[in-house]
């Protein structure tokens, strides 16, 4: 695996690096996201489904952002978001929908469900790092 994918036992993982949890069932998409985030100095963790995201995230020392695919096995991104929002530990962590179902209708639905942003796939490697920087700075990103 790429160096961009850090494990919790990685001694090189820095306490001051932002930590992003990517919830994505497609390995190629995750590798692309992890490489782009690693390139800008962001540590990445990965779950393949929304199922048990809350339990997994509780084990992390901190969490700065969750990138959530909407179409996931076992539990949709919407269902996982509801559990995250109900968790005292995670309720304030920004959760951004990242989906191939990029349309104005899906963006509206994601906003109404309580997502903090929306990024359409395919991801644009020229725009994605700046979108993430903006999200980590507390700005909203709602882009197809």
Image (cartoon, rainbow, N blue to C red):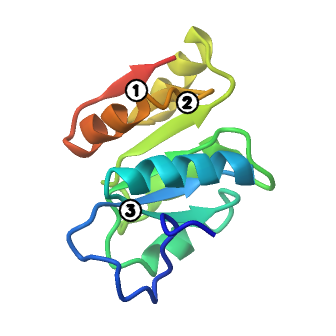
Percent x, y of residue 52:
63, 69
Residue toward you, 127 or 86: 127
In the rendered structure, the answer to whether residue 113 lies left or right of residue 37 reads right
Residue at image mark 2: 123
* Mark 2 and mark 3: Cα distance apart in space: 25 Å
- Dot label at residue 90: 3
Q: Nearer the viewer, mark 1 or mark 3?
A: 1
The N terminus - image quarter: bottom right
Viewer-side label of 2, 3: 2
Mark positioned earlier in the residue sequence (1 or 3): 3
Q: Residue furthest right?
A: 74
Disc on the earlier residue, 2 or 3: 3
- Contact? badges 1 and 3 (CB < 8 Å): no
Relative depth, front residue between 125 and 138: 125
Q: Secondary structure at mark 3?
A: loop
What residue is shown at x 62% (from left), y 52% (from top)?
30
Q: Residues within 10 Å of mark 2 (few under 14, many from 20)?
A: some
* Labels in figure, total: 3
Element under disc 2: loop
SS label for mark 1: loop
Q: Which residue is mark 1?
A: 127
Dividing the picture into quadrants, the one containing residue 78 is top right
* Residue 3 on image: x %, y %: 50, 69
Look at the picture and state if 91 lies above or below 52: above
Q: CA distance from mark 1 to mark 3?
A: 27 Å
């Amino acid at each position: 695996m790429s160096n961009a994918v850090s494990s919790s036992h990685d001694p090189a993982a820095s306490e001051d690096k932002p930590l992003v949890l990517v919830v994505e069932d497609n390995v190629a998409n995750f590798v692309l996201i992890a490489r782009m985030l690693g390139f800008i100095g962001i540590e990445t963790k990965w779950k393949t489904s929304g199922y048990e995201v809350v339990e997994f995230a509780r084990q992390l020392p901190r969490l700065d952002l969750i990138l959530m695919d909407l179409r996931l096995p076992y539990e949709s991104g919407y269902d996982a978001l509801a559990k995250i929002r109900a968790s005292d530990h995670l309720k304030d962590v920004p959760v951004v929908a990242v989906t191939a179902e990029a349309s104005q209708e899906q963006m509206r639905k994601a906003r109404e469900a309580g997502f903090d942003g929306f990024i359409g796939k395919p991801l644009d490697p020229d725009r994605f790092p700046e979108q993430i920087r903006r999200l980590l700075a507390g700005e909203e990103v709602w882009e197809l």
